Image (cartoon, helix red, strand yellow):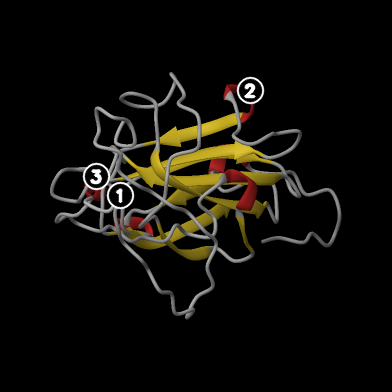
Amino acid sequence: SNCGTSAGGFKSTLRIDVTQGEELLIRVGGFGFESAGDGELLVRTTPPNDDCEDATAISSNTASFSTLGATTDGQSHTSCQFDGQTYNDVWYTYIAPRSGEITVTTCEDLGGSADFDTDLVLYTADNASCPPSDAVLLACNDDDLMNPCGSSDGGFKSTLTAFVAEGEELLIRVGGFDEGNTGSGELLIDIAPTNDDCQDALAIETPVTAFS
């Protein structure tokens, strides 16, 4: 932004760390004795997992999320839909409890939810740096074209799938389709067993076999 230059009128922005519930005093003034006028003051807080380095760990198959106030720090990926970027993103880590096909979704038809046009990206966190590159990209999705939730009437929700290994650490990126597409919702994570489909049936070679 050029708002702080002479062409932009020398506007001001400050960023500090705050604690939830902390009362703050904000002082607004001008550069010089005669610097006075009217304006609009924007105050917002970023989510604690706004940056990739501050990803929040998920230990269950659901997680409430909010991208309100989030910035965009992840890279764009040419293999992802539309312009390849996920805007106003927040980050989560997740360790796969078993091997199989993982589903990550904000789609109401599948058990997730969101009140905005979402975008999802999944990376393997093994040997990954922040922000992650194409080398560790597993899957991405903007609009779930397999369910009503991905249509205009459904609000353009997202679902991605990928095969993961038991114990693999994953990095989940949740954001919006475009700059300013923010909101909140419920993220659903599910891993289907490797023998979920008939064609992937496992052979039983012992009298007793554990299953899930």
**Which numbered disc, 1 or 2, marks the residue that appears first in the sequence?**
1
In front of the other: 45 or 201: 45
Q: Residue beneath label 1, please?
A: 32
- The residue nearer to you, when weighing 178 against 14, is 14
Name of the residue lying farthest toward the top: 78
Horizontal and vertical percent position of residue 49: 54, 55
Q: Residue at x 55, y 43 (%)?
A: 198
Say which label, 3 or 1, has the lower sequence index.
1
Q: Secondary structure at mark 3?
A: loop
The residue that appears at 30% across and 25% down in the rendered structure is: 82
Do the residues under discs 3 and 2 have CB atoms within 8 angstroms? no
| Quadrant of the image occupied by residue 210 | bottom right
- Examine the rendering and report whether any part of residue 193 can be seen: no
Q: Secondary structure at mark 2?
A: helix
Q: Is residue 83 visible?
A: yes
| Left or right relative to 38: residue 159 | right
Disc 1 on helix, strand or loop? loop
Q: Residue at x 69, y 34 (%)?
A: 129
Q: Position of residue 141 (x, y in %)?
A: 39, 36
The residue indicated by pointer 3 is 156
Instruction: Name the residue beneath numbered marker 2.
Output: 135
* Image quarter hosting the N terminus: top left
Q: Say which amino acid is labelled 3.
A: Phe
- Give the amino acid at mark 1: Gly
Front residue of 23 and 57: 23
Of the 4 image quadrants, the one containing the C terminus is bottom right
Alpha-carbon span between mark 1 and mark 2: 51 Å
Residue found at the far front of this picture: 33
Q: What crowding class fits label 1: few (fewer than 14 Cα within 10 Å), some (14-19), or many (20 or more)?
A: few
Q: Position of residue 27 (x, y in %)?
A: 36, 66
Q: Residues within 10 Å of mark 3 (few under 14, many from 20)?
A: many
Residue name at image x 37 percent, y 55 percent? 69
